[in-house]
Amino acid sequence: MKPAMPLILPAGETLIAATHNPGKARELAALLDGRFKVITAGEANIPEPDETESTFVGNALLKARHAAQIGRRIALADDSGLSVTALEGAPGIFSARWAGPTKDFALAMRKVEERLEEVGSDDRAAWFTCALAVAWPDGPAVVVEGRVDGTLSFPPRGNRGFGYDPIFVPEGHSQTFGEMDPAAKDAMSHRARAFELLKAALFD
Ligand code: IMP
């Protein structure tokens, strides 16, 4: 939703990316067309909050507000994951946690396959979600959500992506995100769609 009043997001401003992952911060800066300097929550000495909300939107807002409040700068946060229709939306906001402390996504993908066998459903429909939130210190916040639909395919195929990419075949395609040219994935992904919505909400 567009804010009623134009929000001030001056080009050249330093934003905090509410992540401790420098790769993610670089990706966020690039997706914003280099309009801003982006530092990580780690560089700003902001601890990671517990992700206590039950939705992607809720957790993205929580992380952005927390970083803006403590860092006293405009902050940007994302929350994303894979949802499986036959598993009532699981792993959803727990997508990273299903990979365990060693971030073992071969394990997480096996878990998805096992759960599908347990429920005995042939429905392989799934979708990726990315929520993006921007928060001002003591001020308003904007949040958007992008989604890409597809089906799951086992065994996993391809090693070009990350996370659950090797089991996800986007609608209208035959390759998994793990097999696909990264530029093709980037053009259709939940993250790209969320960024388009965010740019439309903030700049257009
Ligand atoms: P977050 O960093 O807490 O938002 O965790 C997101 C998790 O969802 C990641 O660890 C990935 O496992 C999964 N995920 C999100 N986006 C993608 C994607 O584009 N491909 C594959 N897995 C993804």
Image (tube, rainbow, N blue to C red):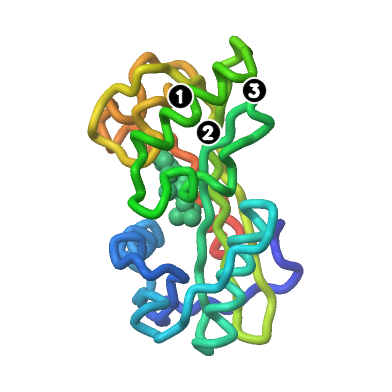
Q: Are marks 2 and 3 in contact (CB under 8 Å)?
A: no
Q: Quadrant of the N terminus?
A: bottom right
Q: Is residue 142 above or below residue 150?
A: below
Which residue is farthest right? 4
Structural crowding at the residue carrying mark 3, measured as other residues with C-alpha within 10 Å and reported as few (<14), some (14–19) or many (≥20): some
* Among the two numbered marks 1 and 2 on one chain, the one whose residue lies closer to the N terminus: 2
Name the residue at the top extreme: 122
Which residue position holds label 2?
148
Q: Identity of the amino acid at label 2?
A: Val
Label 2: element kind: strand
Mark 2 → mark 3, Cα distance in angstroms: 17 Å
Inter-mark Cα distance, 1 to 3: 17 Å
Q: Is mark 1 within 8 Å of ligand 1?
A: no
Q: Which mark is residue 170?
A: 1
**Amino acid at dot 1:** Pro
Q: Which mark is residue 86?
A: 3
Give the residue at x 39% y 85%: 44
Residue 77 position (above or below residue 116): below
* For discs 1 and 3, the disc positioned in front in the rendered view: 3
Of residue 188 and residue 91, the one placed in the foreground of this image is: 91
For label 1, count other residues whose C-alpha is less than 10 Å away and answer few (under 14), some (14-19) or many (20+): many
